[in-house]
Image (spheres, rainbow, N blue to C red):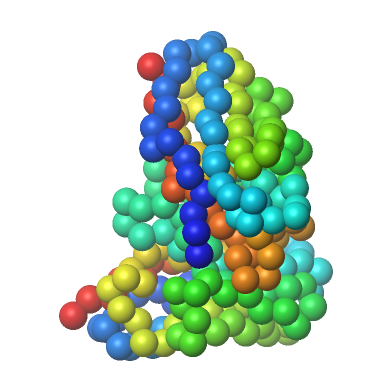
Amino acid sequence: QVQLVESGGGVVQPGASLRLSCAASGFTLSNFGLHWVRQAPGRGLEWVFGISSDGINIYYAGSVKGRFTISRDKSKNTVFLHMNSLSSEDTAVYYCARENGGASLEYWGRGALVTVSS
Amino acid sequence: QSALTQPPSASGSPGQPVTIPCTGTSSDFGAYDYVSWYQQHPDNAPKLLIFEVNKRPSGVPDRFSGSKSGNTASLTISGLQTEDEADYYCSSHAGINNFVIFGGGTKLTVL
């Protein structure tokens, strides 16, 4: 069955970098768009980044422009979110989610907690 | 990135219907009928309930329905059940610069 598993979360200091992984199983990433959505403690959902099925088109929120990037390893069926210059405002649970078309996110991972604190 | 507007809370009794509105501007919804709704229980990942305004993924009960009129989308739950108590989020697609816009979320309480 379709499964997404995030990893790489943790506690980092302001200004640090971190890489999150999203390992997919039960489907091939080359056939679906993949997105990252975050949720700060006690807050709502915020879409952060996305990559199209062909890996050519990249989409991102203004709040992470120039700091976050996304990449994909087709051989591992895994997508990575590279986060730089982290601040306390980036503290959140980060979910990866598979797009069902029309920007709807049908399958979600359980999330990875990123805490930025000195 | 603008957020769609949802009421922070809603409530209803078991068996009763409840509707949660989601309001945006014409640019928030763009030229697409790409409105989705998600349900999130505490400490769980969101679950897709509705996509493309009024379509349900396999396995979602038909008491969940979606609609859109002008710049307001709505999620209606007919016949509330206790397990429907959760947070609900709407989202839209407004082009490549705002690929997914979420509403602020509505906390639904089943009385």
Comparing A17 with A63, the one in front is A63
Question: Residue B99 at x, y = what percent?
Answer: 64, 65
The image quadrant that residue B108 belongs to is top left
Q: Is residue A88 above or below residue A70?
A: above
- Residue A34 position within the rendered picture, expressed as x and y whole percent measured from the top left: 66, 68
Quadrant that contains the C terminus of chain B: top left
Q: Is residue B33 visible?
A: yes
Count of numbered badges drawn on the protein: 0
Taking the spot 60% from the left edge, 32% from the top edge, the residue there is B75
Residue B60 visible in this rendered orientation of the protein = no
Is B27 above or below relative to A53?
A: above
- Residue visible at 36% across and 72% down in the picture: A90
Q: Is residue A14 left or right of residue B4?
A: left
Above or below A117: residue A82 = below
Residue at image position (45%, 18%) is B12
Near-viewer residue (A83 or B22): B22
Residue B77 picture location, percent across and down: 59, 24
Q: Which image quadrant for residue A97? A: bottom right
Q: Decide if residue B10 is on the left or right side of residue B96.
A: left
> At 71% across and 41% down in the image, what residue appears?
B53
Q: Residue furthest left?
A: A118
Residue B90 x/y as whole percent? 56, 45
